[in-house]
Image (cartoon, rainbow, N blue to C red):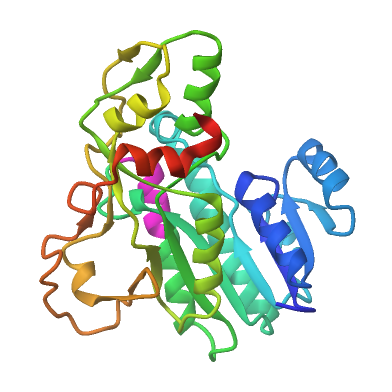
Amino acid sequence: MKDKNVLITGATGSLGYALTEKFIAQGANLTLFSRDEKKQYDMKKIYPDCRYIVGDVRNYHSIRDAVRGMDIVVHAASLKYVNISELQPYEYTTVNVDGTINLVNAILEEGTIERCVGISTDKACLPVNAYGLTKALLEKIMLEANSRQGGNTIFNVARYGNVIGTRGSVIPFWKERREQGLSLPITNPDMTRFFFTLGEAVELIEYCLQAPAGVIVSKAMGGVTLRQLAEVMQGDCEIELVGERPGEKHHEMLLSEDEIKKSYKDSGMWIFNPQDLPKDNEEFPSGYSSQNAYRMSNDEIASMIGEYI
């Protein structure tokens, strides 16, 4: 990464901060792209030596200018809230799908970029909500880009679970309510989810930056129930059942039954290559879901979310 020119889209989010800190330490030259000038103003106080561009991935000329001279691109720009995506699917399509198309076309036109990693989600696997559908299309667009050029750029995808501590996620929300003496709202205590840390999210991206072209990479993480998570965080608060929201799954999947047949494990990661020949997976024959993955204990959850307890 030393002396590489790196562009991060959506750079003022939680992941952008974590990537910026890591890549600066590795000697990269960073260009941080986002559409919120106030967030850029705040970020520049912490990382003054980065290059900042106010722009929008929905504007082709904006992102085309940003990719010039880059070696590596991490595409983190996204709308991500499931409940809002059900109410405004058009907006999610313009950012997560049209924005990705713009970025890919800009990279292919530039022709000299070495690698691009797109950030996806477990909700893209057998999607049932608008957010997941847009991320499933992001994955298809990114991987298809490998066949649209002469191999100058390697496109891969990092498929995430829920990243602890990111803006708007449930753990900081519950912590804030607990500190105010309010109840912890929970939709369905038996739902399961994948959670991992920001540090692990960065490691996943770094793995993608070294992986062969055209793969989707996920961390082999454990599952937790929402009941477990709430119990670990509740302190003296009540847990309040509020009912399920539109677009929610009972259990998330990192790899479907068909995908896991074209996947292998390496260094704690699952690597799915759509071009591989299928073979049966005896460990997870029905796919890798938050229900059948290793179930984390309450002590393991407490250790993982540490600062929020």
Residue name at image x 64 percent, y 69 percent? 73
Q: Hey, which residue is sitting farthest top in the picture?
A: 181
Q: Is residue 80 magenta?
A: no
Foreground residue among 248 and 88:
248
Q: Is residue 167 above or below residue 211?
A: above
One can see residue 83 in this view:
yes
Give residue 76's position: percent from left, percent from top.
Answer: 58, 55
Q: Position of residue 218 (x, y in %)?
A: 38, 63
Quadrant position of the N terminus in the picture: bottom right
Q: Is residue 96 left or right of residue 109?
A: left
Instruction: Classify 224 as above or below 216.
Output: above
Q: Main secondary structure of the magenta part?
A: helix
Q: Is residue 60 visible?
A: no
View extreme (front): residue: 299
Q: Position of residue 85 (x, y in %)?
A: 43, 35
Give the quarter of the image for residue 278.
bottom left
Viewer-side residue, 135 vs 265 = 265
What segment carries the magenta color? 129-137
Residue found 40% across the figure and 74% down from its top? 267
Report the number of discs.
0
Q: Measured along the vertical axis of the image, is residue 169 above or below residue 144?
A: above
Front one among 181 and 107: 181
- When asked about the image quadrant of residue 238, the answer is top left
Q: Farthest bottom residue?
A: 150
Horizontal side of residue 292 vs 214, given as left or right: left
Residue 136 covered by magenta stretch? yes
